[in-house]
Image (cartoon, rainbow, N blue to C red):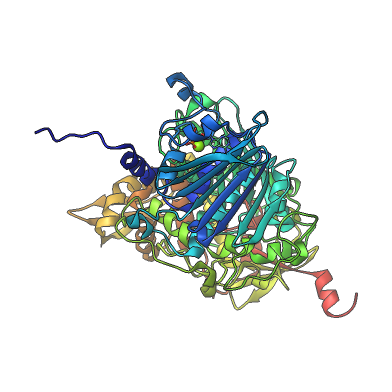
């Protein structure tokens, strides 16, 4: 007897639903995309019970005539493409014609729609894929889809849904994405009867971001505008290096206005921040990548959140360089220098700090000139944190008609508000992102059930000088680290453009911080990170010129690699040799260090290697060369730099400051930490009640 059968429609729809409908947010995604494709100018999303009990999307788009309203639920029924040629240049968000069929097979669905021409509207009701009713119904032009009891007939999938708060977070994140991608469309979002987002049609992304996140957020973003139309145009906003996130939740990436979760772009974005942001922390970003339609394949995944680029490397380059340019024009990094006149060559070692009072380069002048799009000096630093925290959208920030309603109430356990969701709930997505990045390594591990509402908000993190960012799967949380602005009340991070050459060292605090003055006030310079920056630039320059200096060890140091370290050793070894290491793989996993870079104390070499081999784990094999080199240089610099708790003679301090001013980024260390804090004379005067 034959054993192969063609599955009935309702079974194949449910199977397809497994791919398209993962959770309420994926249903919302399909519905919102349909509304956008229908030319809506207003979309409202209403949810109850985390989208499980009710998920309703209404639009004022073109609507459907009765026949279409019925047909829309058929599998592969679409109005958006006609033939395979159309697949090569898809301009609509939908095209597979399977979303409504899939959704209807796993929920109770009510579609109400009306076109401009029709005399009456239509209502179609379906339960678990079965047609219940088709009748006339009143509806203004447009379409409303109400989805109730998601997965009511698929208990196995219902089990995978998370808490109401987590599902609500995903929905909120999704609405935010689409609201940002389509400023011209008005969006409202209502959760359990309370309106949490109300954004009227905006003129551009800037205005929309303002509606969604508030003014502070915008003030502190750097504008990105790069790439080229043939390969990829990259526009949008990114955060300054001092703003850090422990997850990618604050990254909103779009390809041709389609919301994507793309690792290639995420990684390119991070690489743009090389040497100014440490591993394991992420910038915030709203990036729009416009690529010629035929250069990108969106038909890779049923949920269409993955795309494939024909020229992936070129797209990654465009993103990385556009980000880099934005950072450079704001003075956070300098364009890569030409290998130069040996300025970097002179005695810049921890052991040999001293004596030399070398002339200043022009770096400071350049950085002063490079005041970027973001005007950092004009505002007190308490506002300079880019933040999605609840304070960004508090009642004071309500301007005009957008945003939270006047009846806005502070976050409470029972209600979920938009703003706090954006920060406090990172958990679920964070977990997912991490799992994605771990490349299925921990694939079997279930997503921990969390009740995000009860989690404390996670503000940007900073890292104390003695703690390099651990490459742990769980990034440090705010409670264990001081918030970045903790010192701000008194001494503030110095911006590159406010730096002058007129810095005079006075002495040391705790044998760790150089006390100095400049024209604006009192400076505190972290001697370790300052030297780290100096050495980092030096290593990068020497490596570029392939003339690293090494010191031979009298007795080679041997050490054993862990299996994970061994896996990356071969990839890393040639790069390390460019920096002056001489390494030899002995039997098995034993390695001998025969020579080390000139500045690196032999005792540090081993630690440094182990640390580096652990950070650059095998999963990052595809890390761009430049990024890898930056990592090596940063690690070298850290281990070779003057430590804290070390007395410095006045001329050593002088030397260090002069060197620092010549570096590419005197105010940020290669790990993204601040190098100099300033207490302004004005604030001192105020403190003494003299003004
Ligand atoms: P796709 O979007 O891939 O075409 P869907 O299953 O999502 O497939 O939708 C099927 C069809 O139903 C669409 O092609 C469109 O013609 C119609 N449709 C769905 N939602 C709407 C809407 N909100 N307004 C107008 N038409 C819609
Ligand atoms: Mg669709």
Q: Quadrant of the C terminus?
A: bottom right
Q: In which quarter of the image is the N terminus?
A: top left
Observer-nearest of 268 and 332: 268
Q: In this view, does 677 lie above or below 356?
A: below
Q: Quadrant of residue 424?
A: bottom right
The spot of residue 73 in percent (x, y) is 45, 37
Q: Is residue 685 above or below residue 444?
A: below
Q: In which quarter of the image is residue 625?
A: top left
Observer-nearest of 677 and 87: 87
Q: Can residue 245 be seen?
A: yes
Q: Can residue 338 be seen?
A: no
The spot of residue 313 in percent (x, y) is 46, 33
The spot of residue 460 in percent (x, y) is 59, 63
Residue furthest left as drawn: 1
Residue furthest bottom as drawn: 688
Q: In this view, does 199 lie to the left or right of 78?
A: right
Q: Is residue 361 left or right of residue 111?
A: right
Q: Quadrant of residue 339?
A: top right
Observer-nearest of 454 and 138: 138
């Amino acid at each position: 007897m034959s054993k192969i059968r063609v599955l009935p429609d309702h079974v194949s729809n449910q199977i397809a639903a497994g791919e398209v409908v993962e959770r309420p947010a994926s249903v919302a995604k399909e519905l919102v995309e349909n509304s956008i494709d229908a030319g809506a100018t207003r979309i409202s999303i209403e949810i109850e019970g985390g989208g499980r009990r009710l998920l309703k999307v209404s639009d004022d788009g073109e609507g459907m005539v009765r026949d279409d309203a019925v047909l829309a639920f058929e599998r592969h029924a679409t109005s958006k493409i006609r033939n395979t040629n159309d697949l090569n240049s898809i301009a609509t968000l939908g095209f597979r014609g399977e979303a409504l069929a899939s959704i209807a097979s796993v929920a109770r669905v009510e579609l109400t729609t009306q076109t401009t021409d029709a005399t009456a509207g239509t209502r179609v009701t379906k339960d678990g894929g079965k047609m219940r009713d088709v009748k006339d119904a009143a509806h203004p032009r447009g379409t409303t889809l109400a989805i109730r009891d998601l997965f009511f007939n698929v208990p196995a999938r219902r089990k995978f849904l998370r808490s109401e708060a987590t599902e609500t977070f995903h929905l909120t994140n999704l609405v935010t994405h689409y609201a940002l991608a389509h400023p011209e469309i008005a969006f409202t979002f209502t959760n359990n009867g309370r309106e949490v987002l109300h954004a009227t049609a905006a003129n551009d992304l800037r205005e929309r971001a303002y509606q969604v996140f508030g003014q502070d957020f915008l003030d502190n973003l750097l504008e990105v505008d790069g790439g080229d139309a043939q390969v990829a145009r990259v526009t949008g906003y990114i955060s300054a290096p001092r703003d850090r996130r422990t997850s990618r939740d604050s990254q909103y990436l779009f390809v041709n206005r389609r919301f994507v979760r793309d690792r290639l772009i995420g990684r390119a974005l991070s690489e743009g921040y090389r040497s100014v942001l440490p591993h394991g922390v992420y910038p915030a970003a709203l990036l729009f990548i416009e690529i010629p339609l035929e250069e990108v394949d969106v038909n890779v995944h049923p949920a269409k959140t993955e795309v494939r680029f024909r020229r992936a490397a070129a797209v990654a380059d465009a993103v990385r360089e556009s980000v880099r340019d934005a950072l450079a024009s704001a003075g956070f990094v300098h364009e890569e220098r030409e290998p130069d006149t040996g300025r970097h060559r002179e005695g810049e070692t921890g052991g040999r700090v001293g004596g030399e009072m070398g002339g200043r380069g022009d770096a400071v002048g350049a950085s002063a000139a490079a005041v970027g799009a973001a005007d950092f000096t004009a505002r007190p630093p308490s506002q300079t944190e880019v933040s999605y925290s609840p304070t960004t959208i508090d009642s004071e920030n309500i301007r005009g008609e957008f945003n939270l309603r006047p009846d806005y109430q502070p976050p409470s356990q029972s209600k979920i508000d938009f703003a706090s969701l954006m920060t406090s709930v990172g958990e679920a997505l964070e977990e997912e992102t991490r799992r994605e990045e771990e490349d299925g390594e921990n694939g079997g591990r279930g997503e921990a059930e969390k009740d995000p509402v009860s989690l404390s908000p996670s503000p940007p993190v900073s890292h104390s000088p003695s703690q390099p960012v651990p490459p742990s799967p769980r990034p440090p949380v705010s409670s264990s680290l001081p918030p970045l602005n903790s010192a701000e009340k008194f001494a503030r991070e110095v911006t590159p453009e406010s730096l002058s050459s007129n810095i005079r060292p006075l002495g040391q605090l705790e044998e760790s911080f150089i006390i100095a003055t400049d024209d604006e006030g009192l400076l505190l310079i972290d001697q370790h990170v300052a030297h780290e920056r100096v050495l980092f630039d030096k290593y990068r320059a020497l490596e570029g010129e392939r003339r690293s200096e090494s010191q031979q060890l009298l007795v080679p140091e041997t050490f054993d690699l862990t299996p994970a370290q061994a896996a990356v050793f071969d990839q890393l070894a040639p790069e390390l040799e460019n920096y002056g290491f001489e390494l030899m793989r002995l039997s098995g996993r034993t390695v001998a260090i025969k020579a080390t870079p000139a500045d690196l104390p032999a005792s540090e070499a081993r630690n440094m290697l182990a640390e580096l081999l652990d950070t650059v784990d095998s999963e990052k094999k595809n890390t761009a060369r430049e990024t890898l080199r930056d990592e090596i240089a940063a690690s070298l610099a850290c281990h070779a730099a003057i430590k804290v708790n070390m007395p410095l003679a006045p001329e050593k301090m002088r030397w260090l400051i002069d060197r620092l001013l010549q570096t590419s980024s005197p105010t940020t260390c290669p790990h993204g930490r601040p190098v100099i804090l300033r207490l302004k004379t004005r604030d001192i005067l105020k403190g003494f009640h003299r003004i």
